[in-house]
């Protein structure tokens, strides 16, 4: 089995599935190249095991304070 993505994920890291907007948190990294991710939807926690190559890191999208001052 060939690893397509050699990225090492960290437990607690915020990620999303490629092509989706839903934010998830890495809760466990498995030795077989899969990771377990969790997210909340309608006040329920969901847990899913996905291939590590199917997730991508979330880049912080912080808005500069100057944007909020323009009123």
Image: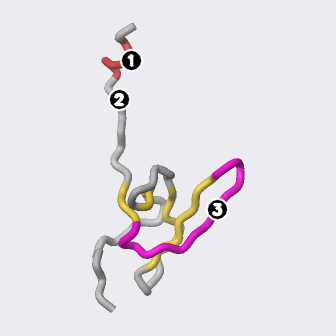
Q: Nearer the viewer, mark 1 or mark 3?
A: 3
Image height of 64 relative to 40, above or below: above
Separation of residues labelled 1 and 3 (CA atoms): 34 Å
**Residue at horizontal 40 percent and vertical 73 percent from the top:** 52
Could you tell me which secondary element the residue under label 1 belongs to? helix
Question: What are the residue bounds of the magenta stretch?
Answer: 41-54
Residues under labels 3 and 2: Cα distance? 29 Å
Look at mark 1 in the image and give the residue it sits on: 68
Task: Identify the secondary structure beneath mark 2.
Answer: loop
* Percent x, y of residue 62: 36, 34
> Going 28% across and 78% down the picture, which residue do you hit?
4
Residue depicted at 45% across the width and 55% down the height: 20
Q: Is residue 11 above or below residue 40?
A: below
Q: Give me the disc on residue 63.
A: 2
**Residue beneath disc 3:** 46
Image location (x, y in percent) of residue 1: 33, 92
Estimate the x, y position of residue 49 in percent, counting from the top left: 54, 74
- How packed mark 3 is, by other alpha carbons closer than 10 Å (few <14, some 14-19, many 20 or more), is few
Say which element carries label 3: strand
Position of residue 41 relative to residue 34, above or below, is: above
Q: How many neighbours does mark 2 have within 10 angstroms: few (below 14), some (14-19), or many (20 or more)? A: few
Looking at the image, residue 67 sits to the left or right of residue 29; the answer is left
State the residue in front, 48 or 14. 48
**Proximity of marks 1 and 2: CB atoms separated by less than 8 Å:** yes
Looking at this rendering, what residue extends furthest in the bottom direction? 1
């Amino acid at each position: 089995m060939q690893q397509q993505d050699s990225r090492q994920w960290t437990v607690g890291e915020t990620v999303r599935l490629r092509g989706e907007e839903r934010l998830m948190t890495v809760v466990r990294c498995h030795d077989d190249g899969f990771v377990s991710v969790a997210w909340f939807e309608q006040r329920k926690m969901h847990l899913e095991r996905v291939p590590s190559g199917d997730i991508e890191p979330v880049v912080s999208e912080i808005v500069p304070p100057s944007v909020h001052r323009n009123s």
